[in-house]
Image (cartoon, helix red, strand yellow):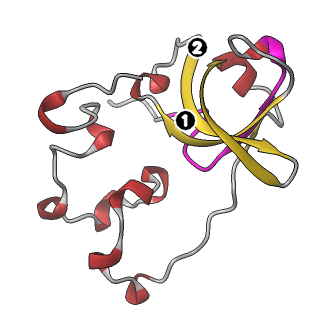
């Protein structure tokens, strides 16, 4: 029997808001729009999560930054703001125009994915992060 999957603590396009004590070298409250979450963030016992994102200042976006965040901080109510899912009519989507890097895996129904269209060399969800199993340096 397989274990039920727990939803990720944070995923691309989420906005996090945490205090200085909850990220390494914190210099005040951090508001960050997440761009990338490292694969090991899915581990259930992880204490720190590496994120890449854009710092938010009020309603405008600022510098891109890499941060190491306490997983426990992301579990607090209100720390992660998840944008509302936008319904997509599959009949109106041209597959040739879809950028796989912008697709949120949490919103994809595996029953609708054609395995012939998935390139394992670039499938970031497999944990390989690029060609020939290479790891990103950040």
Relative height, residue 78 to residue 46 (above, below)? below
Using a 10 Å C-alpha cutoff, classify the residue at mark 1 as few (fewer than 14 neighbours), some (14 to 19) or many (20 or more).
Answer: few
Residue 77 position in % (x across, y down): 82, 33
Give the alpha-carbon distance from disc 2 to disc 1, as whole Å.
14 Å
Residue 22 position in % (x across, y down): 76, 15
Look at the numbered disc 2 and give the secondary structure of its residue: strand
Q: Nearer the viewer, residue 108 or 39?
A: 39
Q: Name the residue beneath numbered marker 2.
A: 48
Magenta residues (range): 6-21
The quarter of the displayed image where residue 84 is located: bottom right
Q: Which residue is drawn at 19% across and 56% down?
A: 118
Q: Residue furthest front?
A: 63
Q: Locate the N terminus and report the quarter of the image it occupies.
A: top left
Residue 2 position in % (x across, y down): 34, 31
Mark 2 vs mark 1: give the one in front. Answer: 2
Q: Residue at x 46, y 35 (%)?
A: 5
Q: Is the magenta stretch mostly helix, strand or loop?
A: loop
Relative to 120, is 96 on the left or the right?
right
Relative to 68, is 26 on the left or the right?
right
The circle on residue 8 is 1
The circle on residue 54 is none
Earlier-in-chain disc, 2 versus 1: 1
Q: Nearer the viewer, residue 132 or 9?
A: 132
Look at the numbered disc 1 and give the secondary structure of its residue: loop
Residue 108 position in % (x across, y down): 41, 59
């Amino acid at each position: 029997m397989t274990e039920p999957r727990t939803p990720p603590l944070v995923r691309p396009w989420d906005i996090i808001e945490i205090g200085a004590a909850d990220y390494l070298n914190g210099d005040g409250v951090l508001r960050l729009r997440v761009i990338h979450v490292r694969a090991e963030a899915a581990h259930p016992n992880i204490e720190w999560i590496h994120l890449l994102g854009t710092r938010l200042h009020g309603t405008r976006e600022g510098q891109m930054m890499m941060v190491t965040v306490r997983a426990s901080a992301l579990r607090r109510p209100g720390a992660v703001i998840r944008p509302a899912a936008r319904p997509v009519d599959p009949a109106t989507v041209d597959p040739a125009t879809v950028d796989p890097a912008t697709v949120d895996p949490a919103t994809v129904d595996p029953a609708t994915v054609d395995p012939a269209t998935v390139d394992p060399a670039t499938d970031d969800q497999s944990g390989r992060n690029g060609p020939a199993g290479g790891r990103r340096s950040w």
